[in-house]
Image (tube, grey):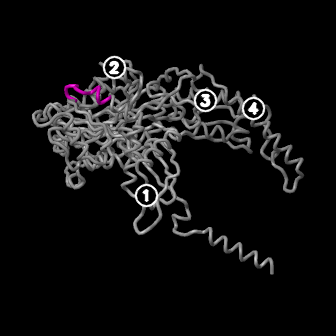
Amino acid sequence: MLLYPKGRIARNHSRAISTLTCHESIKCRFITKAASSDADFVDFAPEEVSSSDALRYERIAAALVARVEAMGDVPDDKQLLVEYGAYAEAVAAAQAQLKGLITPLKAQSHVKSSSDPFTLSESSPRSKRKLKIPDAYLPKVAIVGRPNVGKSAMFNRIAGSSIAVVYDEPGVTRDRLYTRAFWGDKEFVMIDTGGLMSDAARLSPELQQAAMRDISAEGLPSAIERQAAAGVAEADSLILLVDGQQGLQAGDREILMWLRQNHPMKKVVLAVNKCENANKADLMASEFWELGVEPMPVSAISGTGTGEMLDALIKTLPPPASLEESETVQLPLSIAIVGRPNVGKSSLLNAICGEERSIVCDMSGTTRDAVDTEVTLPSGQKINLIDTAGIRKRNKVADSKDGPESISVDRALRAMKRANVVVMVIDGSEGITQQDFRLSELAASEGNAVVVVVNKWDQVDQKKWTEESYKEEVGAQLRHVEWASVVCTTASEGEGVEKVLKAILKAGQEHERRVSTATLNLVLKEATSWKAPPTQRHSQRKGKIYYATQAATRPPSFVFFVNDAKLISDDYKRYMERQLRDNIGFNGTPLRMTWRGKPEREKGTVRVRDTAKKEAASSQKVKK
């Protein structure tokens, strides 16, 4: 039995010691009474506390004792109490005494000791940090394991939001996903990977039917494993997730053996998932001790045990790379690649990145998640490419037997909302479809800059179509985005990729462009001189435009101040938009125009006359 002398620290600060020692994961017994002198020892059961934990508690207690001794004599709680009805001087003296006791402890708590790993350090919440560390400077953690063990659910649990697609089928996750996460004062990047198993016949019989479609397509299993291997290669630490309900499987041994052979220097945290029952958690995890790594029972659904797992994980992470204070972090241009299934979105992403970032397969619906990829261009500019799942018609998605498809479509629509530029990919061999028209309408309503990419140009009948004629046809069919740039390319062979990049960057610049009020009113004056606002029917009133100004960007928004907004017809609004585009630019981005009239005439009443009548009536009463 380990005995610790009580002394002054237990007599006056028993609450601090009990909070420090009674951790959730360790069952301990703490016996102390502040008012009594009978309990003079802190008592731990020897069978429940290991020698390493005992050493850790001794060092923490020694540090805390040193801090308390630096404070001097601490009076009892009764001495700090002020009687009811006391004078203000007595209350101020008690407050000053209490402040003198707390200030030395706070001042010493801010002093950090780099040599002692058990010293309590000051946490710095992310919301109060003046400088946000870029993702490239943060340590990375990859989650690996067999299919359908809960990697994506654990990824969402640690991230604190629903980012990855979670469905009760193996092989749902295919590409690797990235997101920022933190635990305490440690911030890192999480990497979600696909299941490491190429042969679907090795799954249990009840999962083989679902897996045959998901991970047994030709070339798809090896591509999933290449994505997972790439995530493991760039990670600093690993979380090997296993299924506690199924027990230890041969695939778990193979994955751990592969990690030890190819990445022997990387720390591995073994997490036994699906241990929702706390009474059976230790029994379910005991089977995995033979792997040679300490298993930690967790539950991605309820969050049980994730705190202990993250405590062990952050000890294996290296500190973030040094970042000078003078370095400014600029948010990259966010670009979402959307379109119907199997039109070449992932091929276009890989062609821009110059590597196999997303899985490309002939099977429709290969991409499931919205995959973010940060790319640095030769000019030094950074862009964030978002590869999305193919979006089909709503009735086809509802009747689909593929369960995760509806979740994938929802992720794709969310990616459009958070993107600055939408690259809409269409199949040149099939032409413009109704679904392409709806997607263009949605992108325009969200206010995104749009670039239309006609992919598979090598399969288009060159005798019937030229690039110029096909671009005119696209502008005529997709009338909601007739202002968008159109580029013809063959992404699988890398043809026309540079043109796509130039169009994306140009659309991004126009999307956040701001025009001065003087320039805008010069264009307005010239436009109204050529064509004045029309006169409303059955009325002698005529619309007048006083001036205009730009109110916002992304997209560019303009406010026109007129005498009456009802007198400005829709045809004249379209005419004014064409004049802005012809004289100023804004190619590739939508324009939002607001027409604001005088409040009295907006409501159809003239309040000036009523006010004059009231003033005349009040003056007559004064005279009488």
Q: Amino acid at mark 4?
A: Pro
Q: Spatial distance from mark 4 to mark 2, Cα to Cα? A: 47 Å
Residue 462 magenta-drawn?
no
- N-terminal of the pair, mark 3 or mark 1, is 3
Q: Earlier in the sequence, mark 4 or mark 2?
A: 4
Q: Secondary structure at mark 1?
A: loop
Q: Label 3: which residue?
A: 121
Residue depicted at x 16% and y 30%: 219
Residue type highlighted by circle 1: Ile
Disc on the earlier residue, 1 or 4: 4
Q: Residue 509 location, x and y as percent?
A: 42, 33
Q: Callout 3 environment at 10 Å: few (<14), some (14 to 19), or many (20+)?
A: some
Residue 549, x across and y down, in percent: 51, 45
Q: Is residue 138 above or below residue 426?
A: above
Start-end of magenta stretch: 491-501
Q: Amino acid at mark 3?
A: Ser
Residue sitting nearer the eye, 108 or 462: 462
* Residue 494 located within the stretch drawn in magenta: yes
- Going from N to C along the chain, the mark reached first, 4 or 3, is 4
Q: Is residue 16 left or right of 597 when viewed as pictured?
A: right
Q: Are marks 1 and 4 in contact (CB under 8 Å)?
A: no
- The residue to which callout 1 is attached is 568
Task: Label the magenta part by its dominant secondary structure.
Answer: helix
Q: Answer yes or no: is residue 254 visible.
A: no
